[in-house]
């Protein structure tokens, strides 16, 4: 599904503060794989995620999604395959727009945003049903601005929004970093459920080793722009939580 | 009374600017001051074409296109060359001064015996009343178009662009293109105000646009104060308040002048008045963030 071929990413090339964020990364992620990426700060994991999303472009190497060469494709074109949940709950939603408006945009992620009014009673009903499935009691508040909700509620809704339109790849960039433990749990469980229900290919970047242990069926560790550990499904299943802590010892 | 009526009419003429500034400043979060130039451009194109005896319904699309072109330039400079929006606006505004002067060939074009939107239909014997009704219909039409646009899928994407750029890019919207379209739309509206005012006052002048951006800003800020105060979320009511903002602004200026204040001080008073409205919510509603 995602094929990353010898990708390098250099920031500030030729300057005193030159950073080799990614140093020749090769990574193949097959369909329905749920990949967890761990690594210390500055190891290149968020850079890797941003390269897949298209918010930054590689210095060299190639990126392929679903057989398409997307190496030079802008992020708003890659939305055809990719839905994204950001670390900051504010980045994934528009705070001044109503929940309904946010969902409308998400529902046409892969389509043109045309000059027709897309929010009708049928659409409202669909959104209400989807939101009710979260069990957060938000289904009665769809006309409220998104900004009135808490970070956890917004992250959970961002997750729901990602499957409003056809979605193949879900990118989760430390989605629970800004949340309290209870909200974090709800968000991660929702993510896991959606990945399974919709058969998504997912990448989770996280600093939370417990989440890294609990979720996903493949795990890689990054350091200094390289992949230093790569455990497939069987190896990850036999991994113990303490082994993970030892990786960072 | 006529004094206040003409302030009201002027407010209606300038409500298109207020809508334009509302789009650039509130929806896109871009401080666009191309306005001074595109307003004059609208007036100049209007005067130039009217004295060539072209009909009003041909002139208006040309005015809109001219304003949109000015906005597109600002948008291109801002997004493609990554130049600060304020500077991009100043550059285009400055350049437009020469463009406007070249188009006019002199600094003032009076409109005598030419067609006018305000003579298109006669619903009242009193020309001021006639102007009033034509303006009401015209402004209502613009407001309806903008309001409908903001409700569409495209409009939601527009509103989200100024609100959460990362989200809207992840949802497949080319934000650069969106900003260019937004600035084009805002300046097309501004030029439309130039079109109305030129016919209302009967001439186009190279200096008519100086400081006009403050009129739009003031109107939008009056509206914003009311929107925050009353917790308005409806697009229609917000647009209505922007229109009222434009009218209130002109009425306040009219009252100030009728108190016998030196007309030379008008810009100073305008600035102080806008400062007052901006600071009012901060002074009296400290608790509401």
Image (cartoon, coloured by chain):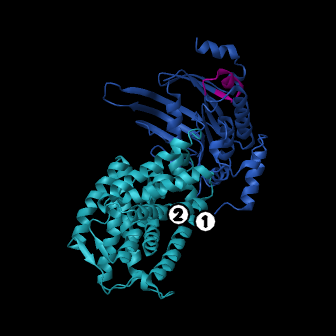
User: Could you tell me residue B56's position as x and y percent?
Assistant: 40, 82
**Disc on res. B197:** none
Give the percent coordinates (x, y) of residue B185: 45, 63
Which element type, helix, strand or loop, lies under badge 2? Answer: helix
Residue B44 position (above or below residue A178)? below
Chain B drawn in what color? cyan
Name the side, left or right, on which A24 lies relative to B83. Answer: right
Q: B10 above or below A209?
A: below
Q: Residue B235: name its quadrant.
A: bottom right
Q: Identify the chain of the residue marked 1, using the numbered disc in the image.
A: A
Tell whether position B131 is magenta: no
Question: Is residue B214 something that shows in the picture?
Answer: yes
Residue located 38% across and 72% down the image: B197
Q: Which mark is residue A116?
A: 1
Frontmost residue, B92 versus A107: B92
Q: Nearer the viewer, mark 1 or mark 2?
A: 2
Residue A236 in the image, given as x and y percentages of width and height: 68, 23
Residue A215 belongs to the span the image colors magenta: yes
Residue B224 or residue A244, whichever sits in front: B224
Image colour assigned to chain A: blue
Magenta range is A206-218
- Residue visible at 43% across and 59% down in the picture: B216
Name the subunit of mark 2: B
Find residue B115 and report its horizontal and vertical position in percent.
37, 85
Label 1 – label 2 distance at C-alpha:
28 Å
Residue placed under numbered mark 2 in the picture: B244
């Amino acid at each position: 599904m995602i094929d990353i071929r010898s990708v390098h990413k250099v920031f500030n090339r030729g300057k005193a503060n030159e950073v080799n964020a990614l140093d020749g990364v090769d990574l193949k992620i097959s369909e329905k794989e749920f990949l967890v990426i761990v690594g210390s700060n500055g190891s290149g994991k968020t850079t890797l995620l941003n390269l897949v999303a298209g918010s930054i472009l590689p210095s060299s190497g190639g990126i392929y999604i679903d057989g398409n060469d997307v190496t030079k494709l802008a992020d708003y074109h890659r939305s055809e395959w990719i839905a994204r949940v950001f670390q900051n709950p504010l980045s994934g939603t528009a705070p001044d727009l109503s929940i309904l408006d946010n969902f409308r945009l998400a529902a046409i992620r892969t389509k043109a945003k045309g000059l027709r009014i897309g929010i009708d009673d049928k659409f409202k009903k669909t959104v209400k049903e989807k939101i009710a499935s979260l069990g957060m009691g938000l289904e009665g508040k769809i006309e409220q601005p998104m900004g009135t909700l808490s970070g956890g509620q917004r992250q959970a809704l961002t997750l729901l929004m990602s499957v409003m339109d056809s979605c193949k790849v879900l990118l989760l960039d430390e989605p629970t970093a800004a949340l309290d433990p209870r909200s974090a749990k709800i968000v991660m469980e929702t993510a896991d459920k959606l990945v399974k229900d919709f058969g998504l290919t997912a990448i989770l970047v996280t600093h939370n080793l417990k989440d890294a242990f609990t979720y996903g069926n493949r795990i890689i560790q990054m350091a200094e722009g390289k992949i230093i550990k790569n455990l497939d499904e069987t190896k990850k299943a036999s991994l113990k939580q303490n082994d993970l802590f030892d990786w960072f010892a | 009374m006529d004094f206040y009526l003409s302030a009201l009419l002027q407010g209606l003429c300038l409500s298109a600017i207020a809508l334009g500034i509302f789009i650039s400043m509130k929806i896109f979060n871009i401080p666009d001051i191309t306005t001074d130039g595109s307003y004059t451009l609208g007036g100049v194109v209007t005067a130039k074409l009217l004295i060539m005896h072209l009909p009003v319904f041909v002139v208006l699309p040309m005015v809109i296109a001219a304003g949109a072109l000015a906005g597109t330039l600002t948008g291109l400079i801002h997004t493609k060359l990554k130049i600060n929006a304020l500077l991009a606006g100043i550059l285009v505004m400055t350049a437009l001064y020469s463009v406007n002067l070249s188009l006019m060939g002199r600094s003032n074009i009076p409109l005598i015996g030419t067609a006018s939107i305000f003579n298109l239909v006669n619903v009242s014997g009193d020309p001021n009343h006639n102007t009033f009704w034509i303006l009401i219909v015209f402004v209502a039409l613009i407001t309806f178009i903008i309001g409908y646009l903001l409700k569409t899928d495209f409009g939601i994407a527009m509103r989200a662009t100024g609100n959460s750029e990362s989200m809207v890019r992840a949802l497949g919207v080319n934000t650069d293109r969106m900003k260019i379209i937004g600035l084009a739309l805002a300046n097309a509206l501004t030029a439309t105000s130039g079109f109305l005012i030129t016919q209302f006052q009967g001439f186009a002048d190279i200096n008519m646009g100086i400081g006009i951006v403050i009129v739009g800003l003031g109107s939008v800020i009056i509206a914003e104060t009311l929107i925050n105060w009353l917790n308005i979320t409806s697009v229609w009511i917000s647009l209505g308040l922007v229109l009222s903002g434009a009218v209130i602004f002109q009425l306040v200026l009219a009252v100030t002048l009728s108190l016998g204040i030196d007309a030379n001080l008008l810009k100073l008073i305008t600035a102080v008045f806008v400062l007052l409205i901006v600071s009012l919510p901060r002074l009296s509603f400290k608790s509401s963030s």
